[in-house]
Amino acid sequence: MNDTAKPNLSELKIDRDATDGGGRRRLVLIAAVAAVTLAVIVILIVGSRSTPVVEVAIARAPASSASATVLNASGYVEPRRKATVSAKITGKVTEVLVDEGMAVEAGQVLARLDDSDARRRFEAVRAQREVAAASIDELEVNLAEARRTQRRTLELHDDGVASQQDLDSANAAVDALEAQIVVARANLEAAQAQLEVTAQDLENYTVRAPFAGIAVSKDAQPGEMVSPVSAGGGFTRTGISTIVDMSSLEIEVDVNESHIAKVYPGQPADAVLDAYPDWHIPATVRTIIPTADRQKATVKVRLTFDQLDPRILPDMGVKVAFREDADHERVEEGAKALVPQSAVSTRAGQTVVFIVEDDTVERRAVSVGRALGSDIEVTAGVAPGDRVVVSTTGDLSDGQRVTVKS
C-alpha cells in the first residue's frame, strides 16, 4: 500500500490581503502619473493660448467739411532746398565742425582745409601792396621838393639870374615825378586787386553753409582730400556735408497719367506718413511737373504741407488722398465716426469691428460708408472716442482679454 500523502487542494488559497495592498499602491502611482500628465497638458494648452497683443486707434468724429477722395497716390517727403556742400578747390581737410542732426545758420563754417600755401601767397601779395603804397609816399615827397625848386627857379628866371634851360629842367622834373606817381598809384591798385584775389583764394579753404538748415550727413573727416569734382578714384571726397532746409519740405508723388486730369494746383489733399498712420496732415497741391515718365506712365505732383511739424523728415514714405475742392464738398448723411480701414473686417458675412474696453474686446457689428483715404466712415456701431483694434497678434473673439500695445 502506497503511504505517499496526496496534496489537499482545499488547502490552497490566495492571500487577498497581501494582493489588495500591492494593487492599491499601483493604482495610486498610476493616478499620480496621470494627474501630472494632465497638469502638463493643461499648462501647455493655456500657454499656447496667450493673451493677444492688439494695436488700437481712436475713432474720430467726421468733420462737417469732409470732402470726397478722388484719387490716392503714394510718394516721399522731399525738400525743395537740399545741398551737398563742398569746397571750391581741391585740398586736405584739417577740421570738420558739423555733425549729423546739427542745426546750421547761413554762412556758418562747416569745415576748413589746409590753407598754408594760400596763406603764404596772400602774405607775399600783401607785402607787395605795402611796397607799392610806400613808393607813392616817397614820390610825393620828391614831388613836393621838385615843386619848391620849380618856384625858386621861376623867381630867379624872372630876375634874370636863372636861364631858360634851368627853368625847363625844373618843370620837367615836376612833370616826371607827377607821371611816376600816376604809375605808382596804378601799381598800387593792381597790387590791391591781386591782394583781393589771394584773399578770396584763402577764403576758399573755408567751407560755409549756403543756407540755414539741418545737416543730415557728414561726408568727410580730417585728413581726407576733398574736391569739387570727382578725382583720384575713391580716395577723394566730393562733399563735406549735406544740408537740408527743413522749412522747404514738401511731398512728391507719382500719379498715373490716366488720372492726372483729376489733379490741379491748389487742390486740397490729406497726407498720411507711413511712420504715423493715424496722423492726417492737411496738404495742398503746389505744382504738376509738366512732363511724364514714359517708363512708368506717371506724372510727378508736388504738394506743400499746410503746417510743418518736427516729426516730418526728409525721405519719409507718405500716402496722399486728393480731395474735391470746396465747391464740390459733400457730407455723407448719417456718418457717426471715422476709423482706419484696417479696423473693419468681415465675419460670417457681417461687417464688424472690435472695441477694446478695460482690456477686453467686444465684437460689434457696424455699417460703413465712404472710404476717405486710409479711413472709412462708420454710420452705425461706433462712436467717436471708441478704441478700435487695427492689428492683433492672434485671432480675436467676443469677450476675450487682450493686451493693448503701448
Image: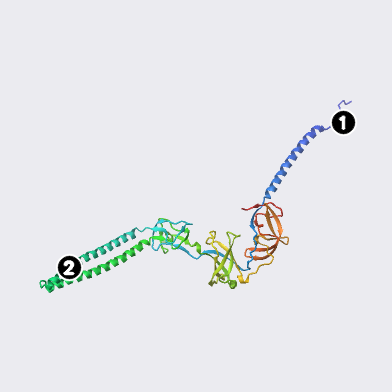
Q: Quadrant of the N terminus?
A: top right
Q: Quadrant of residue 117?
A: bottom left
Find the distance from the CA under tag 2 to the CA under tag 1: 175 Å
Q: Is residue 115 left or right of residue 160?
A: right
The image shows residue 188, relative to residue 3, as above or below, that is: below
Q: Which residue is the site of mark 2?
A: 148
Three-letter code, disc 1: Ser
Rendered image coloring scheme? rainbow
Q: Residue at x 68, y 48 (%)?
A: 47
Task: Give the farthest residue toward the right.
Answer: 1
- In x, y percent, where is residue 129? 28, 63
Q: Which SS class for mark 2?
A: helix
Q: Quadrant of residue 205?
A: bottom left
Q: Residue at x 25, y 67 (%)?
A: 184
- In x, y percent, where is residue 269? 59, 67
Disc number for residue 267:
none
Task: Give the farthest residue toward the left.
Answer: 161
Q: For marks 2 and 1, give the one nearer the viewer.
A: 2
- In x, y percent, where is residue 68? 63, 68
Q: Quadrant of residue 274?
A: bottom right
Q: Residue at x 27, y 62 (%)?
A: 130
The count of marks equals 2
Residue placed most toward the observer, 239 or 225: 239
Residue placed most toward the observer, 27 or 342: 342
Q: Is residue 109 left or right of residue 401?
A: left
Disc number for residue 10:
1
Sequence order check: which comes first, mark 2 or mark 1?
A: 1
- In x, y percent, where is residue 210? 43, 63
Three-letter code, disc 2: Arg
Q: Which SS class for mark 1?
A: helix
